[in-house]
């Protein structure tokens, strides 16, 4: 059975005959505020940048990232979206055996398999709202494990591990010689960024790499820009051995600098998402026909309680209204009743809630 991802609008157009421009996409997890005004104004004026090769070292971009996350440029690597960095980090580690905390984003498993490694999932407990139990996780560690992958906040559960708990995990991994890849693609959407992000731990641990990108928070998935932070020079040099030069084009590099400096956009997004998240949680809390996992990011995982309808059917019914959600039933451990949606413009969210209530109640 075909499962559609948030970026599959062309496939939806072909399969359902709905023009992709008319679809309200609750599946992509992209910031609804769209591109910032500074990008729209200043990026077109820099079109001549494409007439030259980008700086091979991306010095100016790395310095902007360093400023944004308070980190030295030498600990930063930039890539063609976080996807390229996930791939390069896994290639560099080339794990024989990896553990992935799941249900989660599928790219990690795919990449580990492509490198010839084997991966297993550590299942977050469904009966405890997918809340991780650190000691239980740590008890699974052994020295034959090479890599642990954590998506934080996690897609699709929208739950997060605090930096304090992450430190315990990193310590236990260090003892067992396990490298940890943390994907923070959604971290800027959380209310308490400082209590969640593992970037502050990077200097204390040489067995961790934190990956981020601009696709979701800065609403620029077409730009293809990501970055990674690591204190291990060996790991960074190892990645650079595999990395093709210039995988970030000159316009994307310049756009990255503009985005990360745009404090107004960053604050506006955080406030907007926090407001919509609260509104949606309070509405869903009054419904007895769904259960949901308390979200910390810009999307929410919901379970349909009725047996007469599943996420696939809901997906199809909503598409008739040109609304696209994520049928989450193909994530590991999630049954056919789970779906995910992200927070869009207030009126769009209200429209989705209205349809959900009509269909599911
Ligand atoms: C958890 C996670 N990581 C990475 C990505 C890919 O991001 P990028 O566009 O930066 O390659 C996605 C996209 O959906 C994602 O959900």
Image: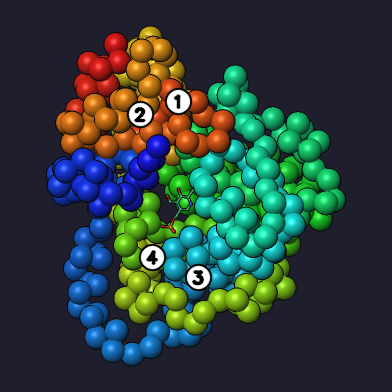
User: Where, quadrant-wise, is the N terminus in this rendering?
Assistant: top left
User: Please, is residue 249 above or below residue 67 in the view?
Assistant: below
- Could you tell me residue 112's position as x and y percent? 63, 56
Q: Are marks 1 and 2 in contact (CB under 8 Å)?
A: yes
User: Where, quadrant-wise, is the C terminus in this rendering?
Assistant: top left
User: Does residue 342 appear in this view?
Assistant: no
> How far, Cα to Cα, is label 3 from label 4?
10 Å
Tell me if 241 is positioned left or right of 357 in this view: right
In the figure, residue 160 lies in which quadrant?
top right
> How far, Cα to Cα, is label 3 from label 1?
37 Å
**Residue 300 numbered tag:** none
For the point 73% across and 44% down, the residue is 169
Asked which secondary structure carries label 3, the reply is strand
Upstream in sequence: badge 3 or badge 1: 3
User: Please, is residue 86 above or below residue 31 in the view?
Assistant: below
Residue at the spot of label 4: 224
Residue at the spot of label 3: 78
Upstream in sequence: badge 3 or badge 4: 3
Residue at the spot of label 2: 312
């Amino acid at each position: 059975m075909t499962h559609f991802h948030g970026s599959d609008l062309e496939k939806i157009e072909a399969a359902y005959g709905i023009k992709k421009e008319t679809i309200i996409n609750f599946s992509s997890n992209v910031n609804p505020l769209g591109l910032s005004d500074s990008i729209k104004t200043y990026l077109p004026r820099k079109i001549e940048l494409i007439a030259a090769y980008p700086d091979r070292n991306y010095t100016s971009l790395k310095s902007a990232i360093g400023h944004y996350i308070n980190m030295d440029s030498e600990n930063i690597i930039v890539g063609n979206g976080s996807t390229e960095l996930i791939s390069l980090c896994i290639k560099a580690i080339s794990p024989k055996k990896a553990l992935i905390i799941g249900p989660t984003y599928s790219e990690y498993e795919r990449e580990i398999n492509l490198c010839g490694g084997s991966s297993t999932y550590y299942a977050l407990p469904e009966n405890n709202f997918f809340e991780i139990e650190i000691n239980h996780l740590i008890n699974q560690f052994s020295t034959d494990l090479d890599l642990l992958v954590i998506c934080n906040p996690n897609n699709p559960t929208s739950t997060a591990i605090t930096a304090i708990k992450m430190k315990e995990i990193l310590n236990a991994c260090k003892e067992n010689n396990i490298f940890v890849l943390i994907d923070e693609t959604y971290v800027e959407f959380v209310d308490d960024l400082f209590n969640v992000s593992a970037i502050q731990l990077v200097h204390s641990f040489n067995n961790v790499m934190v990956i981020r990108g601009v696709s979701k928070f800065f609403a620029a998935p077409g730009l293809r820009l990501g970055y990674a932070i690591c204190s291990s020079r060996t790991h960074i040099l190892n990645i650079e051995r595999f990395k093709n030069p210039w995988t970030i084009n000159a316009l994307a590099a310049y756009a990255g600098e503009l985005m990360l400096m745009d404090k107004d956009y960053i604050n506006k997004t955080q406030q907007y998402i926090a407001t919509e998240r609260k509104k949606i949680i309070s509405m869903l809390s009054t419904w007895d026909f769904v259960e949901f996992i308390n979200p910390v990011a810009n999307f929410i995982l919901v379970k349909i309680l009725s047996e007469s309808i599943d996420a696939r059917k809901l997906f199809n019914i909503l598409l008739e209204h040109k609304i696209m959600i994520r049928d989450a039933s193909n994530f590991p451990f999630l049954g056919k009743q789970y779906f995910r949606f992200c927070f869009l413009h207030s009126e769009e969210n209200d429209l989705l809630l209205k349809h959900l209530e009509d269909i599911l109640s």
